[in-house]
Every structure is written in structure tokens, then in C-alpha cells.
Image: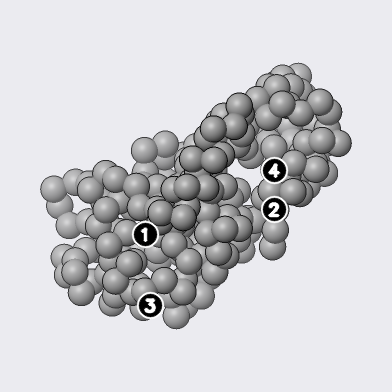
Amino acid sequence: MSDQSPRILIADDHALIRDSLPLIIGESMPEAVFGKASTSKEVFQLIEVKEWDIVILDLGLPGDREVEALTKIRTMRPNLPILILSMLSEEKMGAISIQAGANGYLCKTADLNLIRIAVTEILAGRQYISWELAASLTDVRNQPLGLKALSAHETLILLDLGRGLTIEEIADKLITTDSSVETDRSRILEKLELKNSAELVRYVTEHRLLDA
């Protein structure tokens, strides 16, 4: 975090959350400066034009689905701290979000003081995860390979392949060549220890990476 007032970007499609979080966090950080976004497009635009100390990000913002916005932010700003604040439980999306690059995860049902603590911890350069989520991450990291092995760029391609886009469509979307996307696809299969595209789609489905 900079020596100046902490700059906090709140990204949520519910006005209640966007309006209440500054009040909640401001009780312990009255000097904080807040920005607000309600769609993924607004998040990306604000990240491009301004520097932030932390993004408090909901999953599944309009314009993207679940971890897709998270991985895009990671591509744009690799060192930008991100706290996920979601209605989805830790059990469902916590480990996946941390593996995809989040610095912390909280469910919106969390105690208000936990939100303040999580923001403080992440601004100080530390992660914020519960004991239960930490145990889940330990189990995942003990596996030979997983989503953690993928770069943010590879995760985006994984999601596009999982939703049924062709190599050509992904290449057009990313403004690159078919052969480059095919190389990325092969690398993803290798890292996830999958044999073919059918197993890749099943991986995305089973891990609920595209849940609405």
C-alpha cells in the first residue's frame, strides 16, 4: 500500500453493497478514498486509468462470469491486491478464487468486522483466508497439478474453451493466431493432466468455473 490514503475500488452490481462498504470500512479507515464499479467493463476501465491499493470484487459481475473478471484483473495488474466478497460460499468458490489470484475471500454473510480485518490484512501485504479455506487450499496444493498451475492468460482460455468457443473464435477474441491458442490449449491440458477437449470441458463443469 502507498503512504497516501488507501485507494479502494468496490466492484459489485448491487448498489447496497457499493454504498455500504465505504461506511463499514471507513469506521476503521476514515482517510480511505473509494471508487465504485457495477460491471466488469467499469472495473477494467477504472483499473486502466487509476492506481488502486485494493479491489473488493464480487464474482459474476455483469459482463463476465465468476473468476473471469478476476483473471482479467490479474493480467492487467499482476500485483494489485484483490479481496473477493461474494454470495457464493467458501466451500464452492473460495479455493478456486485464491488459486486464480485473489488475496482473500469472504462471503457476504460474514461479520462486518471481518470485512474490515480482511481489508486491513490485505493492504498490509498479507492474505486473508479462513482456517477452513486454508485447509482446503492445502489439500489442493498437495495435488500434482491444478488451476494454480495456470497463468491468468491460460485461465481465460480455459474458461472460453469450457463455454464452447472454438480455437478460431478465441484467437479472434484475443487478437492472436490460431496456432498460439492451440499451443496454449495443449499447455493447459498438460498442466491439468487432461487428455483432450472433452475432459477439459468436464473439468470446467465439475469445478463450477462458469456457474452463474
**Residue 208 bears which disc, if any?**
2
As shown in the figure, which amino acid type bears the numbered disc 3? Asp
Q: Amino acid at mark 1?
A: Leu
Q: Which residue is mark 1?
A: 9
- CA gap between label 2 and label 1 equals 26 Å
Where disc 4 sits, the SS reads helix
* 66 relative to 198, above or below: below
Q: Which residue is mark 3?
A: 19
Where residue 9 appears, as percent x and y from the top left, is: 37, 59
Secondary structure category for the residue under label 2: loop
Give the residue type that dot 2 points to.
Arg
Q: Residues within 10 Å of mark 4 (few under 14, many from 20)?
A: many
Is label 3 in a helix, a strand or a loop? helix
Between the residue at mark 1 and the residue at mark 4, the CA separation in whole angstroms equals: 25 Å
- Gap between marks 3 and 1, in whole Å? 12 Å
> Is the C terminus in the top left, top right, bottom left or bottom right quadrant?
bottom right
Q: Residue at x 69, y 53 (%)?
A: 208
Q: Position of residue 162 (x, y in %)?
A: 76, 43
Task: Examine the rendering and report whether any part of residue 169 can be seen.
Answer: no
Residue at horizontal 52%, vertical 47%? 136
- In this rendering, would 72 be left or right of 160? left
